[in-house]
Amino acid sequence: MKALRPLRVACLLTLAAGSMAAVLSGAGYLERLLPGGLPLGNALVALGLVAAAAAAWVLAPRRTWVAAASGIVLLLAVAWLPVSIALAGNLALNFSDDRGSTWWVFSLGLLLAILVSLAGAMLAAWRHVVRARRH
């Protein structure tokens, strides 16, 4: 299983990058509704956030504070879409009043947490490999 870790991380990061690239392209197909009424673009953002957070969690050495923090960030990424829908009151994520500002703070904070989690996991994994080679 340990040998598959780099492959899993690479697949998750590719999924995250692909999802975000599709969203950033602004293509018309992103507005298509999935069964249940959720726009495809919103599902892709959620998928990208979860994939990036999962990559950090998979990469982090087990039983370390980095793994624990990455796990918390992963749970927050999984909660992003339900929290967003609850704040907006609709599946299209159209906001009114101060809820839009709250959503922006939550979303940007989560994105920052994911990036920090990925950086921390990469550093911790690198340190783990260096220490293992010394012994």
Image: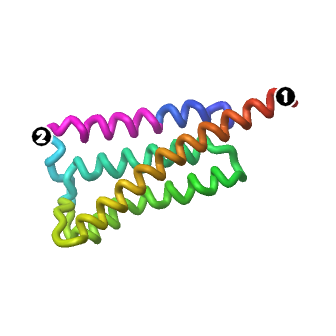
* Quadrant (top left, top right, bottom left, bottom right) of the C terminus: top right
Q: Which residue is mark 1?
A: 134
Query: Which residue lies at the image location 57% right of the left edge and 48% below the top edge?
Result: 57
Return the x and y of residue 27 as percentages of the image width and height: 15, 37
- The residue furthest left is 28
Q: Nearer the viewer, residue 92 or 107?
A: 107
Q: Amino acid at mark 1?
A: Arg
Q: Main secondary structure of the magenta part?
A: helix
In this figure, which colouring scheme has been used for the structure? rainbow
Q: Which residues are magenta?
A: 12-28
Q: Which residue is mark 2?
A: 28
Q: Nearer the viewer, residue 105 or 121?
A: 105
**How far is the residue under mark 2 from the one under mark 1?**
53 Å
- The residue furthest top is 133
Tell me if 64 is positioned left or right of 72 in this view: right
Query: Which residue lies at the image location 54% right of the left edge and 36% below the top edge?
Result: 8
Query: Which residue lies at the image location 80% right of the left edge and 27% below the top edge?
Result: 133
Q: Nearer the viewer, residue 71 or 102?
A: 102
Q: Amino acid at mark 2?
A: Gly
Residue depth check, mark 2 versus mark 1: number of the one nearer the observer = 1
Query: Which residue lies at the image location 25% right of the left edge and 70% below the top edge?
Result: 99
Q: Is residue 92 above or below residue 67?
A: below
Return the x and y of residue 29 as percentages of the image width and height: 15, 41
The secondary element bearing badge 1 is classed as helix
Task: Indicate the quadrant where residue 100 lies.
Answer: bottom left
